[in-house]
Image (tube, grey):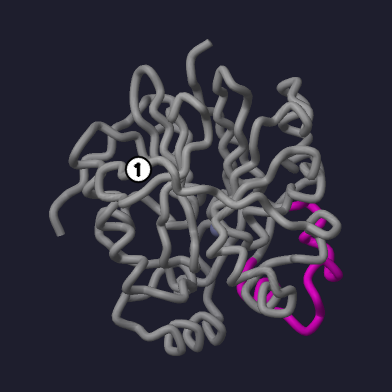
Amino acid sequence: MSISIQIFQTGSVRIRPTAYTQPSHHSVIRRRAKFLTDRTWMPEPIPVYTFLINHPEGPILFDTGMSPKCKSSKYFPIWAPTIKMTSEINIEPEDCVVKQLQEKGIKPKDLKAVVISHVHHDHTGGLADLFEAPIFMSKEHWKAFSRPVYASIEGCAPSHWPKKFVPTFLEAIGGPIGPFPHSYPLTEDGKVVAVDTPGHVTGHISVIVFAEDTTYFLTGDATYSLDLLDREETDGVNDDPKKAVETMRKIKQFAREREVVVLVSHDWKSVERLEGKVVFRPSDV
Ligand SMILES: [Zn+2]
C-alpha cells in the first residue's frame, strides 16, 4: 500500500475581508477591532477541508472540520458571539467528517491518529464523534486553549469536545526538517510528521507527508490560501502576525529546497492541486 491523501469538505464559510487578511504590521488589538466592526463580506465563501492520510500503519486524519450542529444558535455560548458575528456558515448534516469517513469504510476506532492543527471550531467540529481514536496536538497549544472561557472567546466550542477531553501531546523526537528545527513523527517510518507553524495561534502545527511520488505540506491555518502564502500576507484574526510571517517564510523555504504540493485547509484550489500534484513554486517577495 502506498501513501495517499484524500480531502473531505465539511461545509464552507463566508467571512469578513478583514478576517481573511490584514497587513502584518497591524497590531493584534487593531486587527481584532477591524474584523469585529467590519460589516462587509468576502464575495465568496471559503471551504473547510480536512485531510485523510492513507498510510500502511493506518489512516491518519488531519483536522476534523466543522460540525453540522454549529449552525444552531446554541452551539456557541451566548456570551461569546464572535463566530456568529463574523461568519456565515454553510454545512449540511451529511457533511460531518465521521459520515464521510464511514462512506469510505473507516470507523473512528480504525484511525491510527487524529492530528489537530489547532482547536478553532472549524478544525475540531468532528472531535465529539472521534473520541475512540488517539487525538494529538501540541502541548503548547493545549496549554493556551484548554481553559473553556478563553477558548470560547477565541472561536472554539469546547462544550462539544469529548467529555473530560485531554489530547495526547506530540513529542518532538524527529529532528530538524528543512527550516523546521524539530519535528513530531506520526508514523514509525517517519513519512508523516508534524512541524511547528505558530502565528495563527500559539502552538499551531502543520503536517508533512513524504509520499513515494511527492512531498505534501498540509498547512492547516498557517495561511488561508496559497496566494496569501506566496505574498506573505497574514490572515486577519491571528494573535501573532510576526510569527505568522516567520512561519510563512519557513514553508516557502521548505518549498524551495524540494518539490512540495502545498494543501491549504481553506483554499478551494487544494482539491485540484492534490489531483494534479501541482508543485508550489514560491516567488520572491
Ligand atoms: Zn480554520
Q: Is residue 129 above or below residue 240?
A: above
Q: Residue furthest front?
A: 173
Looking at the image, residue 114 sits to the left or right of residue 127; the answer is left
Which quadrant of the view contains residue 191? top left
Q: Position of residue 197 (x, y in %)?
A: 40, 57
Q: Is residue 86 above or below residue 139?
A: below
Q: Is residue 4 visible?
A: yes
Q: Position of residue 90 (x, y in %)?
A: 69, 54
SS state under label 1: loop
* Residue 157 lies within the magenta run: no
* Residue 73 lies within the magenta run: yes
Taking depth in this image into account, of 212 and 9 the one nearest to the observer is: 212
Q: Give the labeled residue for mark 1.
A: 175
Looking at the image, residue 121 sits to the left or right of residue 140; the answer is right
Q: Is residue 269 visible?
A: no
Picture residue at 59% right of the left edge, 21% below the top = 57
Residue type highlighted by circle 1: Gly
Quadrant of the image where one finds ligand 1: bottom right
Picture residue at 50% right of the left edge, 88% below the top = 33
Q: Position of residue 47 (x, y in %)?
A: 56, 49
Which quadrant of the view contains residue 80? bottom right
Picture residue at 54% right of the left edge, 56% below the top = 138
Q: Quadrant of the C terminus?
A: bottom left
Q: Position of residue 238 (x, y in %)?
A: 46, 72
Which quadrant of the view contains residue 96? top right
What is the crowding at mark 1: few (fewer than 14 residues within 10 Å), some, or many (at least 20)? few
Q: Residue furthest left?
A: 284
Looking at the image, residue 116 sits to the left or right of residue 75; the answer is left
Q: Which residues are magenta?
A: 67-87
Q: Residue furthest top?
A: 1
Q: Is residue 148 above or below residue 168?
A: below
Picture residue at 64% right of the left edge, 36% below the top = 113
